[in-house]
Amino acid sequence: MTSLHELPSRHRDGGVGVTSVCSAHPLVIEAAALEALAGDGLLLVEATSNQVDQYGGYTGMRPADFAALVHEIVDRVGLPRERVVLGGDHLGPQRWRDLGPEEAMDRADVLVTAYVRAGFTKIHLDCSEACAGDPVPLPGTLVAERAARLARAAEKAAVELGRPAELSYVIGTEVPVPGGARETIESLTPTTPDAARATVAEHRAAFAEAGIADAWQRVIALVVQPGVEFDHVRVFDYAPEAARNLSAVVTEYPGLVFEAHSTDYQTRDALARLVRDHWAVLKVGPGLTFALREALFALAAIEDELVPEGDRSRLVDELEAAMLADPVWWAGYYDGDPGEQRLARRYSYSDRSRYYWPQPAVAAAVDRLFHNLDTVGIPLPMLSQHLPDQYRRVRTGELSTSARALVIDHVRDVLRDYAYACGKVTA
């Protein structure tokens, strides 16, 4: 597959899918690039509107900065750029939902334009959240009208660049909240077939009303809820029987597949069943930085045994200090007493710690951890204790014992499950 435009037909012919990597962490992106290099498919990397926007987002990156980061990494590992697709996830007014709808949408127009000008070609149009003064919930027709407005801005930017045919759009009103669930989930119901059909009809009509009917042919995927999600301590696993009627709906639209959000922590077999049932785009984000944190904490435990106390990175303590000093990214998510919050900060499935890795003190601790372990060397019996899968690959010569390589490979373990599910077995 050389383009996302081929995905609907390739999926129907052979059941293939594509993994959407939703992370701005350089080590995660490198793991994804290496995984793509091991196969023959596309590398799809997406930035969300809270990570990357025209003002910098929480990462401090604008769309052009994120594109440059991805391209630097893929060039370094040897993955051809023509196999890389950049996507913008949840592009819409939600970053500014405290403002009135017109001001929020004006900013969303600028956001989408910046993404397209930076070379992003997969555009998820998400206008599902209400702005100040909006009716709650938003009528589907209003959501579609706003999505079409943003698509028109994207088309205009692409025409100015001479590349409108490269764009592909994702629509859908039943989308998880960007950044993960804010509360414990008690139950989860798949999108109804009629709701899915209504979303398609409303968006098709809105595209025509906005004067961009030709762009409808570049809508490749519809976001619907297959019944998968996770909160801080629980994963809702895919139940094919519950989504059977919904799954059949996509066959009514030959140019579309489904896109599944929040597939993090699904089992390998559940991911494969999702692809089989036409969720041909599988998005994963926190699950990758969760694996990153697992590997870094494992290496920090090894460091504690090998490195004198005064020379250690104190990575776990530095991360905790950063989260306590600036609780904005976790305080609204983790309830309970101080002990429960402490455990959630470290181990929650929602992985709010991912927002803190770019902070200078935390990043410096990671660098020191890598330096310390590469200097002293990791004894194989200790590696077996803390990272047994990486130990096995070291023993067979597939993997080096550099700390950085071990972390990247542990993240790739998650991506290997997705590669399997999408029909590109590389392990």
Image (cartoon, helix red, strand yellow):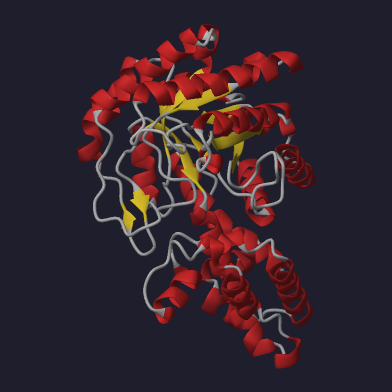
Image coordinates of residue 189 in percent, x first then y, are: 24, 42
Above or below residue 247? Residue 360 is below
How many badges with numbers are in the image?
A: 0
Quarter of the image that includes the N terminus? top right
**Residue 27's quadrant in the figure?**
bottom right
User: Does residue 221 appear anywhere in the picture?
Assistant: yes
Percent x, y of residue 70: 71, 43
Asked if residue 113 is positioned above or below residue 347 in the image, the reply reads: above
Residue found at x 48% / y 13%: 207
Q: Nearer the viewer, residue 3 or 401?
A: 3
Which image quarter: residue 402?
A: bottom right
Whether residue 298 sits left or right of residue 160 in the image: it is: left
Is residue 168 toward the left or the right of residue 110 in the image? left
Above-or-below relation of 127 to 311: above
- Which residue is at a point 39% across and 15% down the rendered structure image? 254
Left or right relative to 145: residue 193: left
In the rendered image, residue 346, in percent from the top left (x then y), is placed at 50, 72
Residue 13: quadrant of the picture: top left
Could you say which is closer to the camera, residue 381 or residue 221?
Answer: 221
Up the image or down, 370 lies above or below 254; here it is below
Res 162 seen here: no
Q: Position of residue 284 (x, y in %)?
A: 49, 47
Q: Which residue occupies 37% across, 54% down?
A: 230
